Image (cartoon, rainbow, N blue to C red):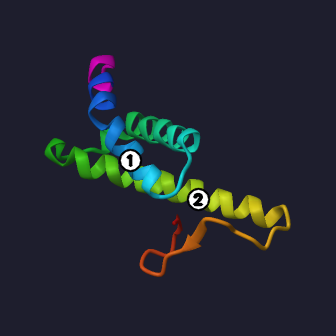
Amino acid sequence: MTSSVFDECYEKYHRRLMGYFRSRGMGWHDAEDVFQETMIGAYRGVGALKEKDRADRWLFAIARNKCCDFLQRKVRRRREEGSTELGDVVWRQDDKKADAV
C-alpha cells in the first residue's frame, strides 16, 4: 500500500469508522486508538485483500475485530482489578463478543 493510497483510505473511512467505534460506547481517545489499530491491521494485511471492490467490507471486518479485541481487553482489565462492575461493557448473545452499550 503506497502512502497516497493509505492517505486516501484514511480520509475516506476515518469519519465512518470513528462513528462505528463511538456507537459502541467508546470515548473519543479510545475510538481513535482503535482506528489506528485498524489502519495498521489493514496496512499489514493488504496482501490478503483479494477483491478490491470488497475493500469496505474487509476494512470494516478488521475494525469490528479490533473493536472486540479492545472491549475484551477492557473487560479483562476490570476483572484483574477485582471489579465486579463492568460498566458499559456487556456481552452480546449474537456474536459472543464484548460490546459496549
The residue located at (44%, 74%) in the rendering is: 95
Please give the residue where the numbered disc 1 appears in the rendered image.
19
What secondary structure prevails in the magenta region? helix
Q: Secondary structure at mark 1?
A: helix
Q: Where's residue 93, x and y in %?
A: 47, 81
On screen, residue 96 versus residue 42, left or right, reads right
Task: Look at the numbered discs 2 and 1 and tell me whether their residues touch, using CB distance below 8 Å.
Answer: no
In terms of image quadrants, where is residue 13? Answer: top left
Left or right position of 2 against 36: left
- Toward the right, the furthest residue is 82
For the residues labelled 2 and 1, the Cα–Cα distance comes to 16 Å
- Mark 2 or mark 1, earlier in chain: 1
Q: Secondary structure at mark 2?
A: helix
Is 2 one of the magenta-colored residues? yes
Residue that appears at 49% across and 51% down: 66
Magenta-span inclusion, residue 38: no
Amino acid on which the number 1 mark rests in the picture? Gly
Q: Report the span colored magenta.
A: 1-6
Residue tagged by mark 2?
71
Q: Quadrant of residue 55?
A: top left
| Residue 3 as seen in the image, left or right of residue 53 | right
Residue 75, position as x, y percentages in the image: 68, 64
Disc 2 vs disc 1: which is toward the camera? Answer: 1
Whether residue 1 appears in this view of the structure is no
Seen from this angle, which residue lies furthest bottom?
A: 93
Amino acid type at mark 2: Leu
